[in-house]
Amino acid sequence: MPETQALLRPATWLHKFVECVYFFITLYFIIITLISYFGNYADITVRTGIANPFFIYRVAALLLSLLFSLRWHRKEHKGVFVSAKLHSLLCAVMRYFIAYEVAVYGFAKILKTQFAASYSRSDMPVGSLSGLELTWNYFGHSYTYAVILGVCQIGGAVLLMFRRTTLAGVFVLLPVMVNVVLINMFYHISAGAFTNSIIITVGLIYLLLLRWPDIKKLFFGEARHMQFKIIPVGLKLSVRLIILTLAFYNIYQYVAAAKPSAFTGKWNVESVSNNGRSVALGPWKNDFLVWRTVYMENSGRVGLSFNPYVYDLSNTNWGDYTYDPKKHHLLIIYPGFSAQSDTCVVTVSHYDGNKMQWNLTHNYDTLEYRLSKVLASE
């Protein structure tokens, strides 16, 4: 029993408190599961007459964990209580609880109840998707990948249920769960899913720390096959710095080469005039000579789209652009822009950060475009 052997050394009160908390968390999830099978939350509220009975349970569980762990610690300190069996029991409860929770998510991926395809969501513009919808679309794009994730979770859960393979199970599951926590946090997944992932991850970290002396020896101990110091310390440090510097520069050179433009962003065409006469912005499919949206990317690419509603590659002309701030000329290099040349010179005026005007000549016509920038929140 490795985790129990770790706690045969004088265990802190925190060890006891954490194990008690997870015991009550396990009991809470058992109650919730039974209710989902045989009733519902509303029935419990009506029968008890308590508006939020589970909140009261959580507060009571926390208080009981605190009181019991303090009493336990005091009795152990006096030498009137041997904690090994109780530690073993509570660690086992924690391991089995985490194994169950993780396995549920694993089977959900394999049985397609998690990351399931949604035909309506697939037709939504990417920019309108929430963090949850983006996550589901991304992970649900490949069922094979979802199955691999599910198998890893189920395999880690199985390892967690055996004392001898607990540490191996933690090594399998902890990277997965840390990633889940970060996704839940930064992609704004539901509060329930985030809380559950935190509970599982903290439990795995606790099981990992129980074996800290073994882990420290494994990862930070002296490697026997590398005991001979062949390279001087100063040279090794220089080589390490050179490796990191080269890795950084390998990417930075692309960042430095791509000069940011004040025009970067999405721009809507508010009005168009041709040879001084206003052009009506009617149904876009009836007029493929009038751009309706302009996409100016950080990479120096510009997309001239005829579709005002969604990005459609078949209805967008892409090219490269450079800007001369002295002449206020925007040079668009676009294959096939006109019969004579693949280069278009646009004169930019009235630019204030949110609006600007383009003047150009196309097929002997003088065109004037008034554009307004689309804010990120729109």
Image: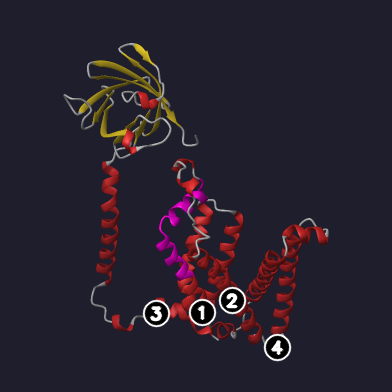
Q: Is residue 239 above or below residue 263?
A: below
Q: Of the numbered discs in the image, which one, if any, rests on residue 96?
A: 2
Q: Of the numbered discs in the image, which one, if any, rests on residue 79?
A: 4
Report the mark closest to the observer, 3 or 2. 2
**Real-space CA distance between mark 4 and mark 3, rounded to the nearest whole angstrom:** 35 Å
State yes or no: residue 55 in magenta: no
Q: Which residues are magenta?
A: 130-153
Q: Secondary structure at mark 3?
A: loop
Q: Which residue is mark 1?
A: 166
Q: Of the numbered discs in the image, which one, if any, rests on residue 221?
A: 3
* Magenta segment main secondary structure: helix
**Real-space CA distance between mark 3 and mark 2, rounded to the nearest whole angstrom:** 31 Å
**Real-space CA distance between mark 2 and mark 4, rounded to the nearest whole angstrom:** 30 Å
The tag earlier along the polypeptide, 4 or 3, is: 4
Where does the image place residue 80, in percent across and percent down from the top left?
A: 73, 88
Q: Secondary structure at mark 1?
A: helix
Q: Residues within 10 Å of mark 2 (few under 14, many from 20)?
A: some
Is 171 positioned to the left or the right of 92 in the image?
Answer: left
Task: Report the amino acid beneath label 3.
Answer: Gly
Q: Residues within 10 Å of mark 4 (few under 14, many from 20)?
A: few
Task: Report the amino acid beneath label 1.
Answer: Thr
Q: Do residues under tags 4 and 3 come within 8 Å of each other at their CB atoms?
A: no
Task: Report the amino acid beneath label 4.
Answer: Gly
Q: Is residue 157 above or below residue 258?
A: below
The tag earlier along the polypeptide, 1 or 2, is: 2
